[in-house]
Amino acid sequence: MWRKPEENKPQSALDALPSIVPLPQSPAAAAPRVSPNAPSCVTQGIKIKGEISGREDLFLDGTFEGKIHITDASFTVGPNARVNAEIEAREIIVRGEVIGTLKASERVQVWSTGSVTGDMETRGIVIEEGAVLRGKVDVRLKDQPLQSAARSAGT
């Protein structure tokens, strides 16, 4: 009627665990480490429709349709990207395909793998050999405001 439990065999899985299980003390140790200067990324295979805005660098290598407003930062269109948008940033780097308007307060770079169809307004421009550009380019002097800045100032 009464049975003596076997000494070498635990009664249940809970009996096999030590009575105190140490827990990680630092939640920061489990968090991924990201460089503070690394741009945010949207990778190939991601499709977004809408509006993106912010103050940090952004690298987009997917498909996007809408508006992009990255103040005081760089926006890079990756080599696999297909972008149909109104883009405004400090610097715009095109390595993929863009259809839309580009307004850069500092510079636009179109790499040899890049294609831009649409109007562009900037203070500086770099176009590599092999790049495709279809549209009007308006290069402003440093003391001339861009059209969007002039409109928001009320002029």
Image: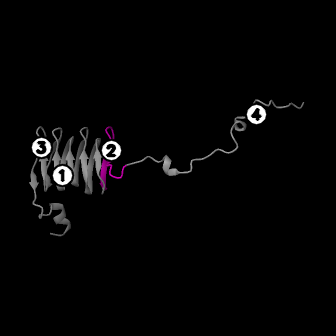
Instruction: Using the numbered discs, state the Cα–Cα distance from disc 1 to disc 2 in whole angstroms.
Output: 19 Å
Q: Earlier in the sequence, mark 3 or mark 4?
A: 4
Instruction: Using the numbered discs, state the Cα–Cα distance from disc 3 to disc 1 in whole angstroms.
Output: 12 Å
In the picture provided, is 120 more to the left or to the right than 6? left
Q: Where does the image place residue 65, in percent across and percent down from the top left? A: 27, 46
Picture residue at 47% right of the left edge, 48% below the top? 31
The residue tagged 3 is 133
Frontmost of labels 2 and 4 is 4
Q: Earlier in the sequence, mark 2 or mark 3?
A: 2
Q: Which disc number belongs to residue 144?
A: none
Instruction: Using the numbered discs, state the Cα–Cα distance from disc 4 to disc 1 in whole angstroms.
Output: 70 Å
The residue tagged 4 is 11
Q: Earlier in the sequence, mark 1 or mark 2?
A: 2
Q: Indicate the quadrant containing the C terminus: top left, top right, bottom left or bottom right.
A: bottom left
Determine if the magenta segment contains residue 36.
yes
Whether pointer 4 and pointer 1 mark residues with C-beta atoms closer than 8 Å, the reply is no
What kind of element bears circle 1? Answer: strand
Picture residue at 18% right of the left edge, 38% below the top? 113
Determine if the magenta segment contains residue 28.
no
Q: Which disc number belongs to residue 42?
A: 2
In the picture provided, is 31 more to the left or to the right than 126? right
Frontmost of labels 4 and 1 is 4
Instruction: Using the numbered discs, state the Cα–Cα distance from disc 2 to disc 4 in whole angstroms.
Output: 51 Å
Q: Which disc number belongs to residue 102?
A: 1
Give the residue type at disc 1.
Leu
* Residue range highlighted in magenta: 35-53
Q: Earlier in the sequence, mark 2 or mark 4?
A: 4
Q: Earlier in the sequence, mark 4 or mark 1?
A: 4
Q: Earlier in the sequence, mark 3 or mark 1?
A: 1
